[in-house]
Amino acid sequence: MSPLEISIKLLKSVVRSFVMTGKSAPLAAAAMMWAGTTGTTLAETEAYLSPPLPEDLTIVGPPVLAERVAAGELPPAAERLPENPFVVPLTGDRQLGKHGGDLRTLVTRSKDTRLLSVYGYARLVGYDQSLDLVPDILEKVEVEDGRIFTLYLRKGHRWSDGNPFTAEDFRYYWEDVALNESLAPTGPPITLRVDDQPAEVEIVDEWTVRYSWAKPNPFFLPALAGAAPLFIYRPAHYLKKYHSAYRDEAEINAEAEERGFRNWAELHNRLDNLYRSDNPELPTLQPWTNIVAPPSTRFIAMRNPYFHRVDAAGLQLPYLDRLILHVVAGALVPAKSGSGESDLQARGIAFMDYTFLKENEQRSGYDVRLWRTVRGSQLALYPNMNATDDTWRALLRDTRFRRALSLAIDREEINAVIYFGLAVEGNNAVLEDSPLYDEERFISWAEYDPDLAEELLDEIGLTEFNDDDTRLMPNGEPLEIIVETAGESTEEVDVLELIRDTWEKVGIKVFTKPSQREVLRNRIFSGETIMAMWFGYENGVPTADMSPEEFVPVRQHSYQWPKWGQYVETSGAAGEPADMAEAQRLLELYEAWIAAGSKAKRVEIWEEILDIHAEQIFTIGLVAQVPQPVLVSEGLMNVPDKAMFNWNPGAQFGLYRPDTFFWDK
């Protein structure tokens, strides 16, 4: 880039930052001055920049490590951090904190040690609260043509054991893990392949790594930012001890057998899991590191002395010294939370627990907050357009029929009766937290209008009725829809009971058939189901840089078109090719999104995809943003009063940086 282009980019970055300070997005502060995915493309290059460290900032380490520093076991705080640590902005109601204290939370399985990675949310690049991608572990990322990604590490960054974090850790993962048939028999992860061709990985220098593909790879950065992220690095200094390329294979195999593993590769894979955080010996880059090996009923995670973030006052993060995970039975989580045994809890409690938790607030010393969930719909109906029955297949593919079903649902009643009026009524669609949100699309064909529903049903030709006032299908059978569910909650039963009443008024009978989750999925995949009830889209707050795969027929687990999705997933080996014009157009748009070289083009593609959904009503949403209770112990600061609770994007609490939570007592 020319100096002029760089100057323009930085200027636009500053302007964008000042504009965003007017929004309710705490991480969108002008002081950050980064260029994110919303922004500027000059010479077909996008840059993601981390803010520089203020010159007069003094680094302050936590008191709990002072003795180790004095004894020479640890270097001083300033020497433990990268040359340019990540300065976390604290704006809005969030405030500068102080070091010290433990945080307790309840989990239901030993494998929930993974929450140390989820909540810690230290990522090469991560989402901020505006859902823009920003550098975190990395200092800078440059993207050329959507296919060449140059990653710049923070010089001086260290693993939790004090060893340097460098490009060698990326090289080790790529050459010695991802491309090693013993450790990765299927080769590199699919995100690191385009048209089944793996990335070209170049170690530019000790602090710079470049990933290149022949075509754009829009999945790469979002995968790095996920709740369960793509880890493209490993602590090479630790794992080389268990790799046959760096130590005698027979010697490692003997050690593996002593530890109960078949060979060196199985031992290596067991010890190498940055996501699960279940190996206390494995160095990490997260704010806390687990010191207890599973199985256990209590996991203790100590602060990472070399964590790379600081606050604006120079205090090294995290503020909290320890994160403690207590393993309890799932059914006990609400009761134990209500008795004050957790300092921060959302997992394991649901909206139905809100009243009980609220009643125990003062006695147990906590506050219950309601965060909005961001599934496209809390629950949705999925007409199976790949149904094997010819009559049903033709009817379910008729757009008028799907619209009529949607219009004949009284969402306001469902909201009032089941969710106390706290949800939002509309389609299974993009929600208002997304920059792609459009209110007209959200409510299209979703208002209760039984008269129009009947007109559409008549227009289709469903004008004959039996003695029970049920419409007759073209084959003379009564229009009776069996809605199949996983039968995992009374919520589904209660919602379907209300739908049954309003559909009956327009001449449609509803019957519910619960079954086990796997049985239900297999019936959907085979085309035996007519309609299923399931959760709405997992990500109701996409940005244009996130994959639209939930909205296009490319996955078998999309229950409205499982065989079309299977056909794409298996490259035509199974399933059926999409044979509806609208579905075919969605596939064309998906391919165009993958190939798009600019954000503007990706926005344009997403908009058309969402327009098609609003008109076609491929799925029938009901209500969204059903509140998630979040229990916060008195005195725990910087936990938002109102926020979004979601797995991906969001990492549940991770988006709000628990390393900045602190005790004021």
Image (cartoon, rainbow, N blue to C red):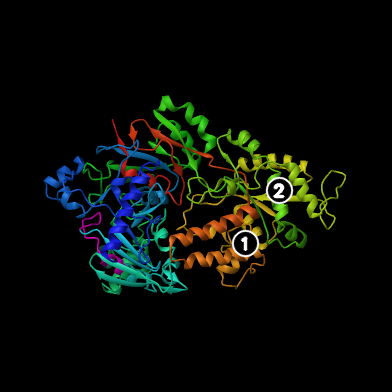
**Is residue 226 inside the magenta stretch?**
no
Say if residue 107 shows up in the picture: yes
Residue visible at 30% across and 54% down in the picture: 11
Q: Residues within 10 Å of mark 2 (few under 14, many from 20)?
A: many
x, y percent for residue 121: 36, 50
SS for tag 2? Answer: helix
**Residue that badge 2 annotates:** 405
Q: Quadrant of residue 172?
A: bottom left
Q: What separation in Å lies between label 1 and label 2 (alpha carbons)?
A: 21 Å
Judge from the rendering whether residue 64 lies leftward or rightward of residue 473; answer left or right: left
Query: Which region shows up in magenta?
Result: 156-172
**Residue that badge 1 annotates:** 562
Label tally: 2
x, y percent for residue 94: 33, 37
Check the image and name the residue furthest to the right: 467
> Which circle marks residue 227 in the picture?
none
x, y percent for residue 639: 37, 38
Residue visible at 25% across and 38% down in the picture: 100
Judge from the rendering whether residue 299 lies leftward or rightward of residue 572; answer left or right: left
x, y percent for residue 300: 32, 45
- Among numbered discs 1 and 2, the one appearing first in the sequence: 2
In depth, the one of 383 and 118 nearer the eye is: 383
**Is residue 168 inside the magenta stretch?**
yes
Quarter of the image where the N terminus is located? bottom left
